[in-house]
Image (cartoon, rainbow, N blue to C red):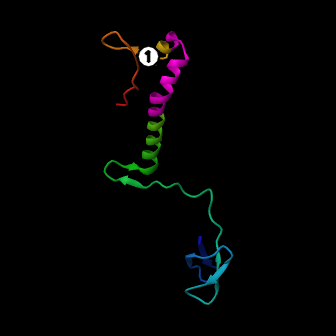
Amino acid sequence: MPKYTFKCHNCGSEAVRYVPASIEQVECTKCPAPMFRELPVISGSPEVKETIDSYTGVQHNQDHDQMVKDRHEQYYWEVEVPRLVQKYSLEASLENKWLVYNEKGELVINKPPSKR
């Protein structure tokens, strides 16, 4: 059963209940008036910025955004760069720094740029 929020227009109390979708009103727990089902908030809800580490001040959305960015970068260097090296010419691969020469003078796929 879905979870709905009900609000009493008489006393102003709110309650969250698991009821069938066909139920539009329930009894108020504080007064004899009925409580009416509220429409769900789909957009415009406040963004969750839960502080995970109070010492460093890292928040959930900042950490998540960085994690997604890191995953995209990792995918690019592990999957896309080898494909690009096979597809493009040696000159283009060297120019875009997909391929580099190591200490032994061998041509190898470049590593992702260091973050720190």
Q: Amino acid at mark 1?
A: Leu
- Determine if the magenta segment contains residue 88: yes
Q: Residue 23, located in which quarter of the rendered image?
A: bottom right
Quadrant assignment for the C terminus: top left
- Secondary structure beneath disc 1? strand
107 lies left or right of 45: left
- Determine if the magenta segment contains residue 62: no
37 lies left or right of 78: right
Quadrant assignment for the N terminus: bottom right
Instruction: Relative to 1, say whether 77 is above or below.
Output: above
Instruction: Relative to 70, say whether 56 is above or below.
Output: below
Looking at the image, the residue that sits furthest to the bottom is 32
Q: Nearer the viewer, residue 82 or 64?
A: 82
91 lies left or right of 12: left
What x and y, as percent, mark residue 85? 50, 18
Instruction: Relative to 96, say whether 27 is above or below.
Output: below
At 40% from the left edge and 54% from the top edge, which residue is drawn? 51
What x and y, as percent, mark residue 27? 61, 85
Residue tagged by mark 1?
99
- The number of discs equals 1
At 66% from the left edge and 80% from the top edge, which residue is drawn? 25
Looking at the image, the residue that sits furthest to the front is 86
Residues packed near mark 1 inside 10 Å, few (<14), some (14 to 19) or many (20 plus) = many
Q: Which residues are magenta?
A: 73-92
What x and y, as percent, mark residue 75? 47, 33
What's the magenta bit mostly, secondary-structure-wise? helix
